[in-house]
Image: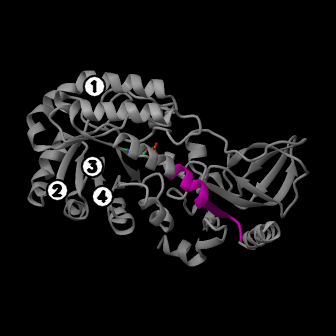
Amino acid sequence: MLSSSCSRTKEVRSQELTLQTPYYLLDKSVLLRNLEKISYLRQTSGVKCVLALKAFATWSVFDLMAEHMDGTTSSSLYEVKLGREKFGGETHAYSVAWADHEIDEAIAACDKIIFNSVSQFERYAQKAEAQNKKIGLRLNPGISHSHFLLADPARPFSRLGEWDMDRVTPVLDRISGVMFHFNCENDEYESLDTLLKAIEERYGEILHKLEWVSLGGGIRFTNENYPIDTLAKRLKDMSERYGIQLYLEPGEASVTKSTTLEVTVLDTVFNGKNVAIVDSSTEAHMLDLLTYSEYTSVAPNTGPHTYIVCGKTCLAGDIFGEFQFEHELKAGDRIAFLDAGGYTMVKKNWFNGVQMPSIAVRHLDGQVELVKEFTFEDYAQSLS
Ligand SMILES: *Cc1c(COP(=O)(O)O)cnc(C)c1O
């Protein structure tokens, strides 16, 4: 038993090493840990969870995710269609602004459409009513938890949702629910609780009249030490208080820690510090690192050798981070960047013509499957 499992581990490892870097490696067993927490929250609180496709849309693993989530939510027509086609369950259609040429298709593909403003509602609600689709409106509560102004839905003059209840009240009887998205990477239950109290205080009157309320995404409830039972009770109490079906829209939280970006060192140089150049790029493959001025992480990140690990584009600040290694790095060494599941594969691009990372999935039995490869043709086809 021991020897067979040992040789299997070896076999899997060697199979993995034959894959050409760069590639994203999604580990289904870690994904499943997140999904089981989502299922647990759904069962204990009655909340429904729809995957926010803008964070993660790698549809090869949607079959597993669909067993633990209720459906998808979107930020565009294409995400609505992908959710309907590849995920199933409930398809929520939200977009900051719909265009005339896409609204019919969006309505046809969804179960619910959530308008971002009363003016969009007025422009298109009749079409949704004609198709008997549920209609919602995004409200901006003017409060939020976000570490970045860039990603703060309640930033000054934010266009994300209606602020003015005088505009909302006249259309209330034509909507069945509202969406509040007011968190970004919120891992503090107390902060969420405080924000929910404020929302209940301000909107209590109207919540009673609604059928459903979505609390959006950005809540890191799949994190190891998150008080998930306290959250479940809070959500259950809230839905009972107003007689509403609550929804959450987890993006990042569904795929947290599930994926690595596997790269190879191409060169090392010393320019006052040790620098290693790898066959990938922050700008092209982990763009959020640049957007939010962050470093990624590696494990175990110990040892006496310090390197600035950089991408191979000509962007001077294409830097994954400064890390510790046990040995001197040399060309051919492998590095795995951690937590590369959310907001990576959905944002990858062909900047500098750098090879786009393949996508590989480690199945629950340990077998690694290459599910997507990109070629020169894909690069050429992305332009004309
Ligand atoms: C971005 C977004 C989400 C998902 O946010 P995460 O931080 O990835 O959980 C959910 N709903 C809306 C409306 C969003 O804009």
Q: Earlier in the sequence, mark 1 or mark 3?
A: 3
Q: Which residue was labeled with disc 3?
A: 97
Which kind of residue does numbered mark 4 sit on?
Thr
Is disc 2 placed on a helix, strand or loop? loop
Q: Which residue was labeled with disc 1?
A: 200
Q: Which residue was labeled with disc 4?
A: 91
Where residue 24 sits in the image (x, y, percent)?
63, 61
Where residue 172 sits in the image (x, y, percent)?
12, 37
Label 4 neighbour load within 10 Å: few <14, some 14-19, many 20+ = many
Magenta range: 20-35
Q: Is residue 140 visible?
A: no
Q: Is residue 34 visible?
A: yes
| Residue ID at (27%, 49%) | 97
* In this view, 103 is above or below 167: below
Which kind of residue does numbered mark 2 sit on?
Lys
Where residue 331 sits in the image (x, y, percent)?
85, 62
Is disc 1 placed on a helix, strand or loop? helix
Q: Earlier in the sequence, mark 2 or mark 1?
A: 2
Residue 307: name its quadrant: top right
- Does the residue tagged 2 have its C-beta within 8 Å of any atom of ligand 1? no
Which kind of residue does numbered mark 3 sit on?
Ala
- Does the residue tagged 1 have its C-beta within 8 Å of any atom of ligand 1? no
For marks 1 and 3, give the one nearer the viewer: 1
Identify the image's colour scheme: rainbow, by chain, secondary structure or one colour.
Answer: one colour
Q: Which mark is drawn over residue 133?
A: 2
Label 2 neighbour load within 10 Å: few <14, some 14-19, many 20+ = some
The mark total stands at: 4
